[in-house]
Amino acid sequence: MGSRGSHETYLLSRCLCCGAFYHLGQTIAMDDIFQDHWRLYQKILNEDYMGHREIASFLQQALAPPLKQLRVLELGCGDGDLFFRLTPRVSVGHYVGVDITEFALNIFKERLNEKDDLPVDVRLHHRDMLSFLTQCDDQFDVIVAGYCVHHLSADDKQQLLMSVLPCLKSGGQLFLYDLFLKDTHDKNAYIRDYMAEVRQRWMSLSESEQVMVESHISECDFPETVSSYREWAEGVGYDGFAQVWQGEFWANKIIRFQI
Ligand SMILES: C[S@@+](CC[C@H](N)C(=O)[O-])C[C@H]1O[C@@H](n2cnc3c(N)ncnc32)[C@H](O)[C@@H]1O
């Protein structure tokens, strides 16, 4: 990895869609590798391999009327997939989306521009979610973080749980939908079991796409057990903690934190 170009390629090649290279303080132009990873994530979404349909339908029910005009913050909002699945069924008055990948936010903005009668005040921020939270002086009824927190270190996950607290209104809720370890898993067992699932059930992925998934989860994913989150939530003072949804794939879950 001698030249700058190959170094960049190495960093990008670790990233399915997580933007992790930005943590190294680099600004890297979109290139074919990033586009390939982005396309692969879109394929995974379209095939619904990570349970996005059920997740959205769970959240639609959890946030359904009579809850009205919610103030919602979404961390790692990407291109707005969840936003467009939730609205207009969930009554969102004010929505703030934060993501570290500008490319994704630009797609989100294009999608918003196609909807001229959307009755939601939408603000998008190209920021790291932790630094956004620590400087945020706003409060929300609901904060959602989807398939992004597992990219953080254990310390940063705890910092995130702490930083979310002052951003939630009284009675507010944090929904974390993400990838989780089984209690018996170490990282190697997680990768083995995850890839067994991918090979068996993610039938539309080519062999090279499966390799991309494996290299991504090996190098960029740092999932935790539900028990770790429970311990951290109690430690920083959440009043409620519950796993509220389990996907067909064992790794996909939603946890709700309440204050
Ligand atoms: C796997 S995608 C998930 C997108 C969407 N939430 C979903 O459920 O499909 C992860 C998203 O989190 C963003 N992300 C990763 N690390 C981040 C960070 N530290 N701060 C903000 N966004 C981050 C990525 O740019 C990407 O859009």
Image: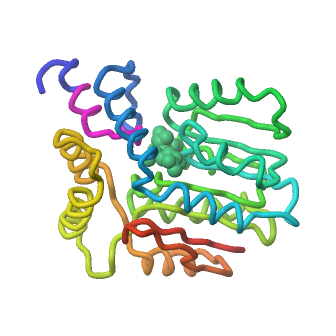
Residue 148 location, x and y as percent?
Answer: 47, 51
Q: Is residue 215 left or right of residue 132?
A: left
The quarter in which the N terminus is drawn is: top left
Magenta segment: 8-20
The structure residue drawn at horizontal position 66% and vertical position 45%, both measured from the top left corner, is 83
Q: Which residue is drawn at 22% across and 67% down?
A: 193
In the rendered picture of this protein, how many numbered marks are placed on residues?
Answer: 0
Residue drawn where x is 61% and y is 64% of the image: 175
Above or below residue 6? Residue 195 is below
Residue nearest the observer in this picture, 199 or 20: 199
Per the image, is 106 magenta?
Answer: no
- Pick the front one: 110 or 163: 110
Percent from the top left, x then y, of residue 19?
41, 37
Q: In this view, does 98 lie to the left or right of 197?
A: right
Which residue occupies the extreme left position in the image? Answer: 2
Q: Quadrant of residue 144?
A: bottom right
Q: Magenta span has 19?
A: yes
Q: Position of residue 236 (x, y in %)?
A: 59, 74
The image's colouring method is rainbow
Residue 192 x/y as whole percent:
18, 65
In the rendered image, the quadrant that contains the C terminus is bottom right
In the figure, 106 relative to 129: above or below? above
Asked which quadrant contains residue 116, the reply is top right
Q: Which residue is drawn at 21% across and 19% down?
A: 4
